[in-house]
Image: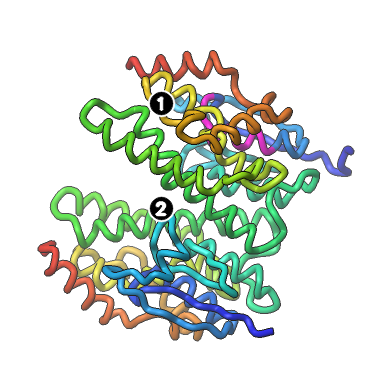
Amino acid sequence: MATANQEEVRLLGKWASPFSNRIDLALKLEGVPYKYSEENLANKSDDLLKYNPVYKKVPILVHNGNPIAESLIILEYIDETWKNNPLLSEDPYERALARFWFKTLDDKILPAIWNACWSDEKGREKAVEEALEALKILEDEIKDKKFFGGETLGLVDIAANFIGYWVYILQEIAGLELLTLEKFPKVYKWSQEFINHPVIKEGLPPRDELFAFFKASASK
Amino acid sequence: MADEVILLDYWVSPFGMRVRIALAEKGIKHEYREEDLRNKSPLLLQMNPVHKKIPVLIHNGKSICESLIAVQYIDEVWNEKSPLLPSDPYQRSQARFWADYVDKKIYEVGRNLWTKKGEEQEAAKKEFIEALKLLEQELGDKTYFGGDKIGFVDVALIPFYTWFKGYETFGNINVEKECPKFIAWAKRCMQVESISKSLPDQDKVYGFIVEITKKFGLE
């Protein structure tokens, strides 16, 4: 199991961030040992600024001194570099579909749900409508598959960690019912498969702490 | 078995241009279909139901949406010649990072140059030049972002050059003065056949921008 060279894998992240968590999940699924450093975004470390001068954000993966930023780009890098557990298909068309869903999640679906959960009275109705439309897109896509990739968990499922876990916490704090068994049974079922997956279960941040973190942000 | 390749596109779209360049670079026979964006075809709505946008690449009846995804698909399927992405995973991650940077920065900020006024436009000007300078830094001494030959980042970025006359005139900036290395790179790209034959004339694009600004009262 040990490689000939000493590999150094570092993750600069933020425990409450779903983007950062994506990388934890992927590394754990590949069985890659890594060093984690928690970043304080109000007081960014020299390493953070050195490794991601363009955006100055986390997550950042540093592999043998080489930094990679942007969670979806890091996920593809992980899949290409460590071959213990294929997370992305080899077929170009399947890969194109997976990439389409990464982008749609980040550009359209996550922002819609996030906005709804943090919306004020004025914008709430419209924001909720958009969030429900976004979830419908996922409901139509997941259909009766166990995971977005099919029988086994893949990169799209990891990228959808916000949907599988964070949404429940945020909607509870906001007093909204966005993702429920009644409204979106297929996405709901997927989320249960996701959080009960043995590696994912261990890799997600503790629910109570996450709840407390976002509740505190909500009251500011 | 002959491949059937169709590209649903709109002539002035820099995103569509990316796919045109990739198809040309690989020498792929395809049918180009111009979409009327105010009256989208049933095929477009069927092939991209989620976003209803161009470009859409259709390969043997299967659709691939989003320009950079389509370019990667083309690179992976037609992999015998002109590789656009590097073979090393780390170099690939960097190419994807910079192409993504182009998506995040150049299009939105460029658009603000000709659609906004006053303070917002000033902010856009600053941001635009900063972005080009960062790209110049990334280019370094290389001929192209891809090295000796054009690569993923060159394909992602060069289409926006066709919009420069519009950005410069409406935004009141002189890119060549601020970022000479960038313009030198762009001119080298325009000498590459797959690029020059895939891009519309800058004057025609400028004419389009003028029309839109008049139509929406943006002057």
Q: Which residue is the extreme one toward the front?
A: A182
Q: Quadrant of residue B117?
A: bottom left
Residue at image location 18% in from the left, 69% down from the top: B212
Q: Are marks 1 and 2 on the same chain?
A: no
Residue at image location 47% in from the left, 65% down from the top: B47
Dot in front, 1 or 2:
1
Question: What distance separates the C-alpha of mark 1 from that of mark 2?
Answer: 32 Å
Q: From which residue to which does the magenta span run? A: A16-26
Residue B209 drawn at (x, y percent):
22, 71
- Horizontally, residue B55 falls left or right of residue B93, namely left
Q: Is residue A22 magenta?
A: yes
Residue at image location 38% in from the left, 38% down from the top: A131
For the stretch drawn in magenta, the main secondary structure is: helix
Residue B115 drawn at (x, y percent):
20, 59
**Which element is circle 2 on?**
helix
Q: Quadrant of residue B149?
A: bottom right
Residue tagged 2:
B104
For disc 2, the chain is B
Mark number, residue A177: 1
- Horizontally, residue B78 falls left or right of residue B106, namely right
